[in-house]
Image (spheres, rainbow, N blue to C red):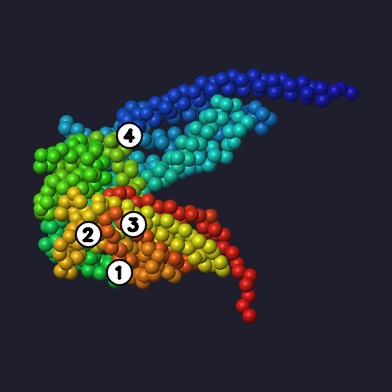
């Protein structure tokens, strides 16, 4: 009788020996491919940061070839089986997963290889400042697949445990995991905007934009008082400035037909919604967009396709891309624009009409440069990141489908109307001055305790008027209590650095105020409703150097499985950036007390 087991064992030794040798060779080849992938990836990142799009398109193609080669070398059955071998198998499995993820992502990104080089704005030799909307559509078309690949890759790589891997493999896994986790949200957020961007730039015909310059020194819900506006036209990727005027031109009438706003909003904000000086009192920018479009049509008998809200920080970002402009002998650039618009313009010119004219001239000069193509697109993209994050650049579309896409993004200025822990402090200037440039706002959300499906928590708002004592050194145009003058008061009391704040505190959907206090004293708030949120209003006079606190104790219905959630607290754009904090929600307890 033969010994077949010996033959089998010998065959196994030969097979595994050959497989081991094969893995060594393939491993060396894969290592070379991965090193090339890393090197080309670093070059690509630098090119994208420098906005060298033609070079980035070429490098992206190289990265794809590198990734596919690494994937081929690590993707065959033998490598897959070897991934189950103790110790060494962990490294092989990680390399296989990483290369597969990179191959999927670069394949999804392949359309960008030809589209990216076409996104350079054409200069003086062509149509000035014009963007290729066809290339933009190609990018938009690729983004859903690319976003899905990045999201899926983040999950796959996130499941790999770097502990126990060889240091070089562990480093690669950690680096890729960090990059994909960071990119996952931005890629997903970019999809709806990129899909609409070609149309916004006039790919399908001319579009009309109304851009509102909001001066945060006199606070309004979406930022500040509209001091000037610009009418822009976009057509086939090119932007032109059609008009720029101070708000006084809008004030001449007709008034805004506020009937386009919800009834509960009209009840709370009243006739302010009919006036260009107060129509943006609600922080929910879709309301502002609808009202602005209705007012624009009443004035011009023409529709507007988009309404944008910008403030002094956005103007500073635009000037970073265009370079400085000259206004009445003053050089305004990205370093001084925010201060110039919120304080400097009032210190230099006392006449309100001159201030409005200067502000308008700044808007004309800035957007005029964009019309002439005198701007750096890479710088613009980088400089706008922070203003967008702070809700200082807001956008509304006069098309339901486009608006639905935009409302997925923070740039829409939407106040979410769903149940859940939420707070927002909204300041509207009640003094008729520019003293909000000195106002610091801090909001603290304490969800409190939960018993029997009801939470009793608190929203606490601290207001700090940092103006100099007695308003010393402040321009009279800034330091004035127009509300007191209208009541017949005169003298120092009307120019002492004080202010009056119309404070609206937005609470969670379905909540009710149990107790409202101003500096510990009980007050009765004016109540309202905005996009499903209860609104509690308190009028707060505040002296120069004074700090005041408003507390709202509220009862909030419990949302299923909400324990551990961090409340959403939104900050209104202010000259002094508002701050906020929130504690996570606790478990809801069931009371064991029985009455009797």
User: According to the image, label 4 marks what residue?
Assistant: 116
> In percent of the image, x 56 and y 34: which residue is there?
97
Whether tag 3 and tag 1 are in contact, CB under 8 A, the answer is: no
Query: In the rendered structure, are the residues bearing label 3 and label 2 in contact, judged by CB atoms less than 8 Å apart?
Result: no
Residue 138 placement (x, y as % from top left): 34, 40
Q: Is residue 344 above or below residue 567?
A: above
Question: Of circles 3 and 2, which is in front?
Answer: 3
Answer few, some or many: residues within 10 Å of disc 1's Cα (few below 14, many 20 plus, some between 14 and 19).
some
Residue found at x 41% / y 36% = 109
3 or 1: tag closer to the N-terminus = 1
Residue where numbered disc 1 is placed: 268
Q: CA distance from mark 1 to mark 2?
A: 18 Å
Q: Which is more N-terminal, label 4 or label 1?
A: 4
Q: Give whichever of 316, 440 is nearer the camera.
A: 440
Query: From the viewer's perspective, is the residue at label 3 or at label 1 nearer?
Result: 3
Secondary structure type for disc 3: strand
Instruction: Say which residue label 3 marks.
Output: 547
Q: Earlier in the sequence, mark 3 or mark 4?
A: 4
Q: Residues within 10 Å of mark 2 (few under 14, many from 20)?
A: many
Q: Is residue 211 above or below residue 135?
A: below
Answer with the quarter of the image where residue 183 lies: top left
Q: Of helix, strand and loop, which one carries label 2?
A: helix
Q: Tell whether label 2 touches label 1 (CB within 8 Å).
A: no
Q: CA distance from mark 3 to mark 2?
A: 35 Å
In this view of the protein, can residue 286 be seen by the observer? no
Name the mark nearer the viewer: 1 or 4.
Answer: 1
Q: Mark 2 = which residue?
A: 292
* Quadrant in the picture for residue 538: bottom left
Q: Quadrant of the C terminus?
A: bottom right
Residue 147: quadrant of the picture: top left
Nearest-to-viewer mark from 1 and 2: 1
Is 114 displayed left or right of 325 in the figure? Answer: right
């Amino acid at each position: 009788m033969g010994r077949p087991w010996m033959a089998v064992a010998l065959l196994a030794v030969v097979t595994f020996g050959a497989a081991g040798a094969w893995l060594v060779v393939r491993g060396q080849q894969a290592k070379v491919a991965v090193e090339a992938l890393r090197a080309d990836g670093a070059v690509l990142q630098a090119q994208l940061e420098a906005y060298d799009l033609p070079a980035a398109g070429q490098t992206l193609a190289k990265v794809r070839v590198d990734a596919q080669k690494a994937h081929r070398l690590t993707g065959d059955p033998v490598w897959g089986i070897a991934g189950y071998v103790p110790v060494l198998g962990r490294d092989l499995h990680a390399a296989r997963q990483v290369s597969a993820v990179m191959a999927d992502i670069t394949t999804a990104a392949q359309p960008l290889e030809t589209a990216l080089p076409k996104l350079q704005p054409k200069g003086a030799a062509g149509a000035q400042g014009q963007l290729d909307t066809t290339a933009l559509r190609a990018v938009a078309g690729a983004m859903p697949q690319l976003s899905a690949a990045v999201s899926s890759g983040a999950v796959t790589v996130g499941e790999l445990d770097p502990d126990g891997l060889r240091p070089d493999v562990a480093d690669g896994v950690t680096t890729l995991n960090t990059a994909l986790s960071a990119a996952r949200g931005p890629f997903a957020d970019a999809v709806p905007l990129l899909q609409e961007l070609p149309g916004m730039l006039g790919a399908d015909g001319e579009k009309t934009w109304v851009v509102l310059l909001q001066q945060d020194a006199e606070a309004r819900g979406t930022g500040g008082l509209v001091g000037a506006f610009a009418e822009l036209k976009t057509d086939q990727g090119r932007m032109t400035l059609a008009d720029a005027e101070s708000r006084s031109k809008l004030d001449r009438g007709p008034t805004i037909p506020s009937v386009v706003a919800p009834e509960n909003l009209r009840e709370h904000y009243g006739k302010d919604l009919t006036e260009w000086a107060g129509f943006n009192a609600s922080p929910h920018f879709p309301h502002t967009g609808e009202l602005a479009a209705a007012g624009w049509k009443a004035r011009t008998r023409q529709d507007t396709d988009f309404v944008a809200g910008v403030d002094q920080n956005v103007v500073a970002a635009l000037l970073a891309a265009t370079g400085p402009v000259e206004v009445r002998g003053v050089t305004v650039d990205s370093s001084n624009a925010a201060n110039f618009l919120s304080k400097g313009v009032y210190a230099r010119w006392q006449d309100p009409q001159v201030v409005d004219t200067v502000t308008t001239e700044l808007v004309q000069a800035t957007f005029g440069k964009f019309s002439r193509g005198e701007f750096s697109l890479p710088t613009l993209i980088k400089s706008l990141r922070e203003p967008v994050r702070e809700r200082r650049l807001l956008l509304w579309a006069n098309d339901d489908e486009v608006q639905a896409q935009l409302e997925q993004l923070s740039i829409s200025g939407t106040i979410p109307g769903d149940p859940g822990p939420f707070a927002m402090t909204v300041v509207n200037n009640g003094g008729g001055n520019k003293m909000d440039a000195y106002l610091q706002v801090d909001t603290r959300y304490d969800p409190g305790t939960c018993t029997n499906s009801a939470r009793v928590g608190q929203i606490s708002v601290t207001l700090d008027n940092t103006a100099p004592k007695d308003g010393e050194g402040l321009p009279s145009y800034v330091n004035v209590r127009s509300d007191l003058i209208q009541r017949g008061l005169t003298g120092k009391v009307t120019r002492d650095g004080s202010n009056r704040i119309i404070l609206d505190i937005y609470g969670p959907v379905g909540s009710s105020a149990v107790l409202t206090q101003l500096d510990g004293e009980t007050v009765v708030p004016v109540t309202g409703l905005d996009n499903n949120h209860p609104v509690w209003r308190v009028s707060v006079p505040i002296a120069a150097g004074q700090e005041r606190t408003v507390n709202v104790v509220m009862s909030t219905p419990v949302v299923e499985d909400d324990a551990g959630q961090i409340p959403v607290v939104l900050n209104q754009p202010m000259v002094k950036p508002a701050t906020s904090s929130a504690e996570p929600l606790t478990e809801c307890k069931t009371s064991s007390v029985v009455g009797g």
